[in-house]
Amino acid sequence: MQSGDKRLRYAEIVSGNIIFATGIEMRIFPDMCGYLSYKRAYENGTPYFIAYLGDKAIGITGLYCEERLGEENTVWLGWYGVLPEYRGQGFGKQILLDSIAEARKRNFDTFRLYTSVKNCAEACKLYDKVMDIGEDYTLEEPEMLRRVYSKSLTDKKVIPWNNRYLYLTENHGEEETALSVYKRRMNEED
């Protein structure tokens, strides 16, 4: 992945840096663990990246496909975020734009993401500016106040998500499993 901002560079998350990447993600999302998502991604050939400013890791981003959702040419943004000390400097917007550019380069038609409105209010302001549409998602756990954002990567108008099922509740047990596998791997590296 290349950046429109020459100060940023990206390293794909692979087995050699997955522990480091998970540590970054857990600083951004302290109550979550993306270790298994990253592991699955590099095993399946979908890209997740560490964003660097010079030699400093400042954030993460990734693309994934969810075949269960029935949209062949759609890619989803996964584990996107910027470390707290680098927020408010435009890096989040640049990483998002670079992720969109990477999806377009890979010939996807639609770029989507879902997020928590309550926990990611600042990110939602950015999504409102960059994405084509934002829709409340209430089908699973309506009390969570989620939103699905979509952007067309072609000259065609984006098709709204229309509150279709996202399989979010089916992945609840994965967080604890991911955290325990991550901790075990960290101990093995010590």
Image (cartoon, grey):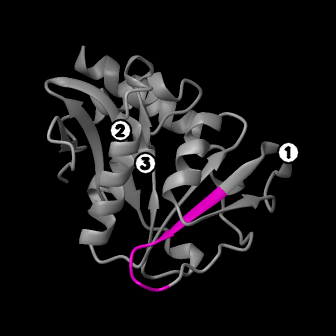
State left or right for residue 98 relative to residue 182: left
Which three-letter amino acid code belongs to the residue tagged 1? Glu
Q: Is residue 89 visible?
A: yes
Q: Is residue 151 magenta?
A: yes
Task: Say which element carries label 1.
Answer: helix
Residue 60 is tagged as 2
Residue 22 is tagged as none
Height in image: 180 above or below 151?
above
Which three-letter amino acid code belongs to the residue tagged 3? Ser
Q: Quadrant of residue 89?
A: top left
Label 3 belongs to which residue?
A: 37
Residue 143 is tagged as 1
Chain part drawn in magenta:
148-156
Height in image: 91 above or below 57?
below
Name which of mark 2 and mark 1 comes first in the sequence. 2
Q: Looking at the rendering, in which quadrant would you find the N terminus?
A: bottom left
Q: Position of residue 126 (x, y in %)?
A: 53, 45
Q: Position of residue 16 (x, y in %)?
A: 18, 36
State left or right for residue 140 relative to residue 91: right
Which residue is at 59% across, 60% downward?
Answer: 149
Q: Quadrant of residue 77?
A: bottom left
Mark nearer the viewer, 2 or 3: 2
Which residue is at 25% across, 26% downward?
Answer: 57
Task: Say which element carries label 2.
Answer: strand
Which three-letter amino acid code belongs to the residue tagged 2? Ile
Name which of mark 2 and mark 3 comes first in the sequence. 3
Q: Is residue 174 visible?
A: no
Q: Is residue 61 magenta?
A: no
Q: Nearer the viewer, residue 121 or 108?
A: 121
